[in-house]
Image: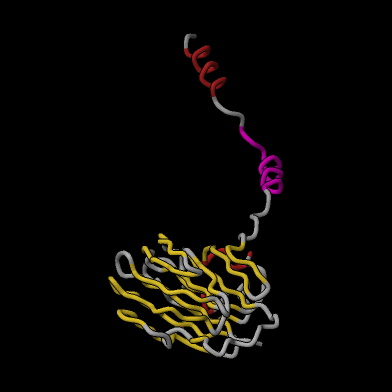
Amino acid sequence: MRWLPIAAALLATLPPIASPADSGAAAQAAPAPAPPRAAIDNPHVRVYRTTAGALARVPPGPGVVVSIEEGSLGTAVWMKNVAAPSRASSMRGAVVVVEPRRAPHAAPPETGSKPGEGTFTGMSFKTMFENERVSVIRARMEVGAREGFHTHASDTIVVHLSGGDIEDTADGKTIVNRWKRGDVEFEGLGSSHSARNAGGAVDVVLVVLKPE
């Protein structure tokens, strides 16, 4: 009968059916996801870019989790152990994790200033929360905003929410940094600079580390 060779030809084109044992072996062979790579790693702080669903893979320890996802953009919480998410469970998508390290800090310079204490125009600073390890601040630079020359009294991590173009002058050199959402920068204790917004409004979360 003509249908027999046709059916045989169709069966020959089908992929082999994997047995349950084969499927189990393949699942066991899949490598474990790698832990997130630190965007900043120095004696005072580690900073990771990851997702809320992958917090369990971040090295354990206390820290700040900042959402950089639409819907919860700029939300920040303190967690006693960022690798055991509870308070961050309502977050979805991309996050930045800031883990302060217990390391000796130099004494703040006499001329140092905290965020919002220096000379500036077109900028706003609002404290979100504070504890014995960090002060977390929501800050904004309006179009054309300027921040006068100042010296940082604390190590500060800047988490960019909106991105934007900021002209920065330090050590006699001026550059324009073009930040994107989720970018992070470290402004060390004792470092000095001035800044000008060279583009649209810029929103950030500042995580200010407190000395041990």
Between 152 and 91, the residue placed more toward the observer is 152
Q: Position of residue 65 (x, y in %)?
A: 52, 74
Q: Residue at 41% x, 80% y: name it.
A: 138
Dividing the picture into quadrants, the one containing residue 82 is bottom right
Dividing the picture into quadrants, the one containing residue 145 is bottom left
Q: Residue furthest top?
A: 1
Q: Is residue 127 above or below residue 203?
A: below
Between 92 and 75, the residue placed more toward the observer is 75
Count of marks placed on residues: 0
Q: Position of residue 12 (x, y in %)?
A: 57, 20
Please check the rendered image and state whether residue 20 is part of the magenta-colored stretch, yes or no: yes
Q: Residue at 39% x, 79% y: name it.
A: 148
Taking the image as shown, residue 87 lies to the left or right of residue 103, namely left
Q: Is residue 206 above or below residue 12?
A: below
Q: Position of residue 91 (x, y in %)?
A: 47, 71
Q: Position of residue 71 (x, y in %)?
A: 37, 69
Instruction: Please provide the residue range marked out in magenta.
Output: 17-30
Q: Is residue 92 above or below residue 211?
A: above
Taking the image as shown, residue 34 lies to the left or right of residue 146, namely right
Dividing the picture into quadrants, the one containing residue 53 is bottom right
Taking the image as shown, residue 166 lies to the left or right of residue 16, namely left
Q: Is residue 104 above or below residue 38?
A: below
Q: Residue at 51% x, 75% y: name it.
A: 88
Between 181 and 8, the residue placed more toward the observer is 181
Please check the rendered image and state whether residue 158 is part of the magenta-colored stretch, yes or no: no
Most common secondary structure along the magenta stretch? helix
Q: Residue furthest front?
A: 172
Taking the image as shown, residue 170 lies to the left or right of residue 45, namely left
Q: How is the image coloured?
A: secondary structure
Which of the image's four quarters has the C terminus? Answer: bottom right
Between 129 and 112, the residue placed more toward the observer is 112
